[in-house]
Structures are given as structure tokens and as C-alpha cells.
Image (tube, grey):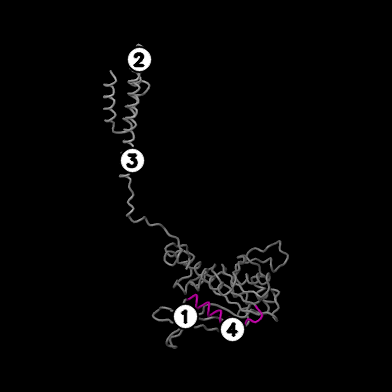
């Protein structure tokens, strides 16, 4: 077969190849070790010198032309395959995206962040303390003498005693029953003046719609040389007005008893109860004004100051403590305290806060 006829045959087969596999078969048939052009080039040795030269040039030109033609056809087939895939695998970006699960900030975490902002704006610093405490920090230093009935006010979780502790007051271990223990540690360490807020988990053996074995508390402490009940009331007004986002929140201080403050006062806020609903604020009609207890407060007891190495003749101050879970329930209308700790995503999706809301 001469070069012209072979060129026509191979060109026709290359044009007829509709996929890369068929085209590769044509390439092997033409240019492979046993291909038709290769076989013709092997026969050049049997020709005379001048004829071998002419014939060799023809076959080399044919080989290059067929190789170029195959490359062009290969590029066209690859491009056509890519176009087909793009058409078949197109992502319709006009469709709505698949819904993704979004995390939420727990209402208690949201409350803690809000309170931290409120009190740091007033100049308070944030303090922390351990969840596992000893008898000294949890009771004795807070003016709960050994055997005093006030210790029975809180149903405490006791832990195994520390056998290596020589001081019997510090050998007895408990899960802290109030965050006031952090105040004792900070006053003992830094002395006075001091202005701090501490928040965290506390533990008592109780469980119903308004009590859980683990809950959260906030303690506020301000000790200086000229602190009075007037400073306490001003702090309460600023705190409660900002937190509940009500311009005029009536507050009332009722005499009470706490071992670590003297005088002590329960703090009530004004509210309106109507049609089974509760709204915080001042009632237009005084007869409609109701009151709701929200926290305890008072002037720090001199014995507490002495226990921390602070002279009560020189320094005095106030403290206030509130249940963060209770404040959260009041602000966000959560009816049952226990639901906060049941790890139910449906509840968290309903009452929780998005990250953007949490940062406001």
C-alpha cells in the first residue's frame, strides 16, 4: 500500500473515532511497534539508496501528519467530553441550600455574659473559685460557726475528707453551696479595698420545678472605707434596670437574715400579675403593684472581714447574691428550671441565642 492510500485510510479512521479508546486503537494501528507506518519504515532497508531516501522522506512526513491529526482529534474528543460532563454535572446555584444545624448559646451562658458586661462597666473585676471547697471557705469563714443551725439552711454534698490535710477545717471537703467562697479567697489573697463579681456552679441536694442539685449563682462584693447601704441600693438599681431592660424598676429591701451579712435584706422587684402573666415594672395603679423576690443582699458581716484579715473598724462593704437560673427564667419566660439541664436540642433551639444575638 502506498503512502497516499494509507493516509486516506488512517485519516478516515481517525475522523470516525468517537471516543478516546477507539482513537488510541487507531494510533496503535498506525504508529505502534507493529503499526502499518512502522512496518513500511522497516522495509526501507530493502530499497536502493536514492529510492530509500525518497521513500523515507514520504513515510516520515506521513508519520508526522498522522500523529498531528491524532493529537487534534484527541483534543477535540477531550473537549467534547468535558462539555458533556459540565452539562450533566451542573450545580444549580439558584436552588435553596440544604438547611444546616446551627448552634445556640444557652440562656444561662447568655445571662452570665450580660451580667459580666453590666458589672465590669461599673468597675467590678471578675473572680473565680473551685467547685470543690473545704469547710473553712464554704462555712466557717462566712460566719457559719461549727454546729450553728445556719449550716442546716443548705443541704450540702459532702466528699471524702482529705487525709493529708492537718487543719481539720480544711480537711472536710464539700461541693460548694454558694459562690461566696470565691469572695473569701479573693479577700484573703488581696485584702481591701476590693470590688469583684464571681459567677459559677453551686450544688445543693434539692430537686423540683424551681430547684436542681446543680445551679448557678452570682456574687457581688464591694469593700472600701466608706461603703454604705446607699451604695448597695444604687448598685441594685443600675443592675436590675439594665438587666431587665425596664426604665423604672421598683425595688424593695426587706429585712432578712444571712450569716455573712449584717444587716441583711431580701431584694424584691416590682411586677404586674394579670391574666396569668407576669410583667416586670411599675404598675400604673398602686393597687395592681406586686412584688417578686429576686436576690439577697446586705452589709458584709464584721466577722467575715476579720476571717479574711480585713479590719472591720477601717473597712466595710456590701455583698449581693442571686441565682442566675432564676434571673434567666424571669427575663426569658422559662417556666421550669429543670428543663435547662436536660440537654434537649428542641428546647435550646427555642430558648437559645444565635452567636450574633449573644454578641449584642
**Numbered circle sitting on residue 247:** 1
> Where does the N terminus fall, quadrant-wise?
top left
Spot the residue most to the right: 166
Q: Look at the numbered disc 1 and give the secondary structure of its residue.
A: loop
Q: Which residues are magenta?
A: 224-244
How far apart are the alpha carbons under marks 3 and 2?
Answer: 44 Å
Residue 234: name its quadrant. bottom right
How far apart are the alpha carbons under marks 2 and 4?
Answer: 119 Å
Magenta stretch: helix, strand or loop mostly: helix
Please identify, in this view, whether the residue under mark 3 or under mark 1 is nearer the observer.
3
How far apart are the alpha carbons under marks 4 and 1?
Answer: 20 Å
Give the mark nearest the N terminus, 3 or 4.
3
Q: Look at the numbered disc 3 and give the secondary structure of its residue.
A: helix
Label 4 crowding class (10 Å Cα cut-off): few <14, some 14-19, many 20+?
A: few
- Residue denoted by label 4: 230
Q: Which of the two residues, 5 or 321, is positioned nearer the viewer here?
A: 5
- Residue denoted by label 3: 82
Which residue is located at x 71 percent, y 61 percent? Answer: 164
Residue 304: horizontal and vertical position, in percent? 67, 76
Q: Look at the numbered disc 4 and give the secondary structure of its residue.
A: helix
Q: Which of the two residues, 80 or 335, is positioned nearer the viewer here?
A: 80
How far apart are the alpha carbons under marks 3 and 4?
Answer: 80 Å
Q: Are marks 2 and 4 in contact (CB under 8 Å)?
A: no
How far apart are the alpha carbons under marks 2 and 1?
Answer: 108 Å
- Vertical position of residue 60 compared to residue 227: above or below: above
- Residue denoted by label 2: 52
Residue 199: horizontal and vertical position, in percent? 57, 69
Indicate whether residue 225 is drawn in magenta. Answer: yes
Which residue is located at x 50 percent, y 68 percent? Answer: 108
Give the mark nearest the N terminus, 2 or 1.
2
Q: Which of the two residues, 148 or 76, is positioned nearer the viewer here?
A: 76
Label 1 crowding class (10 Å Cα cut-off): few <14, some 14-19, many 20+?
A: few
Amino acid at each position: 500500500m502506498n503512502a497516499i492510500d494509507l493516509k486516506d485510510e488512517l485519516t478516515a479512521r481517525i475522523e470516525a473515532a468517537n471516543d478516546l479508546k477507539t482513537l488510541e486503537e487507531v494510533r496503535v494501528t498506525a504508529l505502534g511497534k507493529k503499526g502499518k507506518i512502522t512496518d513500511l519504515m522497516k522495509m526501507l532497508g530493502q530499497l536502493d539508496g536514492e529510492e530509500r531516501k525518497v521513500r523515507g522522506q514520504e513515510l516520515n512526513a506521513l508519520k508526522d501528519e498522522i500523529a498531528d491529526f491524532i493529537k487534534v482529534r484527541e483534543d477535540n474528543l477531550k473537549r467534547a467530553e468535558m462539555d458533556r460532563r459540565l452539562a450533566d454535572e451542573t450545580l444549580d446555584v439558584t436552588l435553596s441550600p440544604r438547611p444546616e444545624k446551627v448552634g445556640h448559646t444557652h440562656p444561662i451562658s447568655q445571662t452570665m455574659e450580660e451580667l459580666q458586661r453590666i458589672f465590669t462597666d461599673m468597675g467590678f473585676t471578675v473572680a473565680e473559685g473551685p467547685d470543690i471547697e473545704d469547710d473553712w471557705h464554704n462555712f466557717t469563714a462566712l460566719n457559719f460557726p461549727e454546729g450553728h443551725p445556719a449550716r442546716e439552711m443548705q443541704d450540702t454534698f459532702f466528699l471524702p475528707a482529705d487525709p493529708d490535710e492537718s487543719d481539720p477545717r480544711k480537711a472536710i471537703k464539700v461541693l460548694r453551696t454558694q459562690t461566696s467562697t470565691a469572695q473569701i479567697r479573693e479577700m484573703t489573697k488581696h485584702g481591701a479595698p476590693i470590688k469583684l463579681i464571681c459567677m459559677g456552679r453551686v450544688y445543693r441536694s434539692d430537686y423540683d420545678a424551681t430547684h436542681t442539685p446543680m445551679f448557678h449563682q452570682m456574687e457581688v462584693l464591694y469593700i472600701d472605707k466608706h461603703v454604705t447601704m446607699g451604695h448597695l441600693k444604687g448598685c441594685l438599681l443600675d443592675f436590675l434596670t439594665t438587666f431587665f431592660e425596664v426604665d423604672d424598676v421598683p425595688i424593695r429591701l426587706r429585712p432578712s437574715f444571712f450569716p455573712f451579712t449584717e444587716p441583711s435584706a431580701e431584694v424584691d422587684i416590682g411586677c404586674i400579675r394579670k391574666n396569668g402573666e407576669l410583667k416586670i415594672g411599675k404598675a400604673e395603679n398602686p393597687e395592681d403593684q406586686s412584688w417578686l423576690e429576686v436576690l439577697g443582699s446586705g452589709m458584709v458581716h464584721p466577722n467575715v472581714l476579720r476571717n479574711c484579715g480585713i479590719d472591720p473598724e477601717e473597712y466595710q462593704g456590701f455583698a449581693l447574691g442571686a441565682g442566675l437560673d432564676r434571673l434567666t427564667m424571669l427575663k426569658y419566660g422559662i417556666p421550669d428550671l429543670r428543663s435547662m439541664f436536660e440537654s434537649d436540642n428542641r428546647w435550646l433551639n427555642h430558648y437559645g441565642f444565635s452567636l450574633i444575638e449573644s454578641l449584642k
